[in-house]
Amino acid sequence: MSDSPSYRTAVFGATSAIAGETLRALLADRPAEILLIGRNADRLETVAADLRARGAVCEVHATDLLNPDAGWESLLAGKEWDLFLIAHGSLPDQDATLADPHATGREIDINLISPVRIAAACARILDKQQKGTLAVFGSVAGDRGRQSNYLYGATKAALETFLAGLRHRFADLPAVAITLLKPGLTDTPMTANIEKGPLFSSASKVGEAAWKAIHKRKSTAYLPGWWRLVMGVIRHLPEFVLHKTKL
Amino acid sequence: MHSWGRVSPVTTTVDAPAWADQIRPAPGPVLAYGLGRSYGDSCLLSEGRMIETRFLDRILDFNPGTGLLRAEGGISLDAILRFCVPRGWFLPTTPGTRLVTLGGAIANDVHGKNHHRAGCFGNHVPRFELLRSDGTRTLLSEGNPRHAATIGGLGLTGIITWAELQLVPIRSAQLDVELVRFSGLDEFLELSKDSERFWEHTVAWIDCAASGRSLGRGIFIRGNWSAHGGLDPHKPPGASVPVDFPNFALNRFSITAFNTLYYRRFFGRTNSLQQHYSPFFHPLDSVQGWSRIYGKRGFFQYQVVTPTGAGAEPMREMLRIIAESGQGSFLAVIKTFGEKASPGMLSFPSPGITLALDFANQGESTLELFGRLDEVARSCDARFYPAKDARMSREDFVRSYPRLDEFRPHVDPGMSSDFWKRMNA
């Protein structure tokens, strides 16, 4: 899979709980050199301490990923990368966000515009290397527009389409993998205010599944896998049935 | 929110910080909540704010040479084991479940099967940071009175943001285990005494449904770490109990049948085996949500320690009362505590015999049974355990903990719990 003895990874939005669990699963599997990129330096350092204790060589870089001129690209230059992982996202209160045009734009920025910009920059590097993996966290919410979270869902659906196109572009380069990771309901701080039901998975389980999907160079992975079935049903519900639900 | 006994759930405000800088210790009253494995109301606060700590689960530092681990307070012992076992280290002592947080293990000063050697959990936490409701963060080391107040302090002295834990080296994740059947309490005490020197871990299961000549029969379980067998950590839980059992599922007959079968599960007097640490230390953790077998009504745990000087008689009397009531359960555990003292001011273990049992909540009749057990316990100056308790009286609490007055000044005015309110009503 990789020529370098240590698996070199750059993570965007590295304070995400699922990203953290994905990296823990990676480190349980093999040695890695990890660059953590995110907004809050102290929190990145906390994540780095955890990963270092688990054997990683870890560096952090605090930057504003929403700013297209932040200039983090230079950090990646001159090295060969095995994995780029894009993990930042936000799941706000939908009604409040839609009531405020600035907040609406900001959410789209976090969940779509910034990941697309980063993915495009990473794709340039993969193209130059002619190998490596780009893995991006989408969501099952992108599978169908539903009243409960269609703003978030719309951004994730658009991201999915973008990645599908990117995968098409690299179709003749089997050493490059573009992986879309679609967690279902996951018990993380992001969902702390949502009542937990049997459909919730632990972040560690989702992280392990995410690493497995990356390792196997999957195109699209539901995390855990049974969400593919659940969303298959939801995607195929006729609208008049869907509209009778509170999904 | 509910505690592990599920008897009286509370509705309250809950914070779930993901980062140490997000913990809001004020306005009060607040109470840190780990994984909710305390049985009664010591981990609950109904009029106030509960701060769930389980997302604060990072390892901050680990020295592979000395085994000193520093981690955030919300990390579970489960996660610590998955980390340290493959590296050849183990918890200095572990309670019967690994699904508790580091902070919770300190705040309840939990104990395990090696108490006669290792003492309590609080004997192995050289330093930790305490966040008080006034916003101050203080590093507390062994010898500091507030360190001692926080060990076993039920979360009332502040929030443990991170702690250092001294792990112990192991060569294998397996234990060499010996099971010895005993016919009564005297034999149990003899076995305990004989085993302390050569066995690191000892505990006994007791058939609390047996009466008459069989009263106090059980199986003594003792183990030492194996020298070989690999360093595989435990697997994630397989089975789960997804729904509450109907109340009739546990009755006098099913309990007696289970206990008799369990007592007779091997031939001869002793049985030797090699066992992974997971079934040895945490037999119920492989079944998620096992407390649901007690149904919606929930259950109580009754645990006391009777002082060494009182001998076996009070324990025998309690077992007689329990057998007579027909309300026993599967989970009756008896162990002798050693002399090693914990720094904790409100630490539960003290030299003597401890008995722990689960009882389904059958309302009045269960409380009546507890009343009778309490009388025996009081007569020999036994001590009660807040982490397991949902009903002890204020007098019993005060009598159980002679260092309570020394503890009180360390209580953070912004912290409280339903248990603490009950004890100070």
Image (spheres, helix red, strand yellow):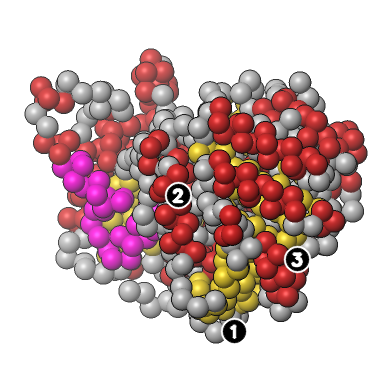
Dot 3: within a 10 Å radius of its alpha carbon, few (fewer than 14), some, or many (20 or more) residues?
many
Q: How far is mark 3 from mark 2, CA to CA? A: 30 Å
Mark toward the start of the polypeptide (1 vs 3): 3
Mark toward the viewer: 1 or 3: 3
| A210 within the magenta span | yes
Mark toward the start of the polypeptide (3 vs 2): 3
Q: How far is mark 1 from mark 3, CA to CA? A: 21 Å
> x, y percentage for residue A116?
33, 44
> Residue placed farthest to the front in the image?
B213
Q: Does dot 3 land on a helix, a strand or a loop?
A: helix
Q: Disc 3 residue type?
A: His
Residue holding disc 2: B255
> x, y percentage for residue A25?
44, 62
Chief secondary structure of the magenta span?
helix
Mark toward the start of the polypeptide (2 vs 1): 1
Label 1 and label 3 in one chain: yes
Residue holding disc 1: B227
At 78% across and 35% down in the image, what residue appears?
B397
| B415 within the magenta span | no
> Residue placed farthest to the top in the image?
A99
Residue holding disc 3: B116
At 50% across and 60% down in the image, what residue appears?
B283
Q: Disc 2 residue type?
A: Ile
Range shown magenta: A205-232
Are the residues at dot 1 and dot 3 in contact (C-beta closer than 8 Å)? Answer: no
What is the chain identity of the residue bearing mark 3? B
Mark linked to residue B273: none
What is the chain identity of the residue bearing mark 1? B
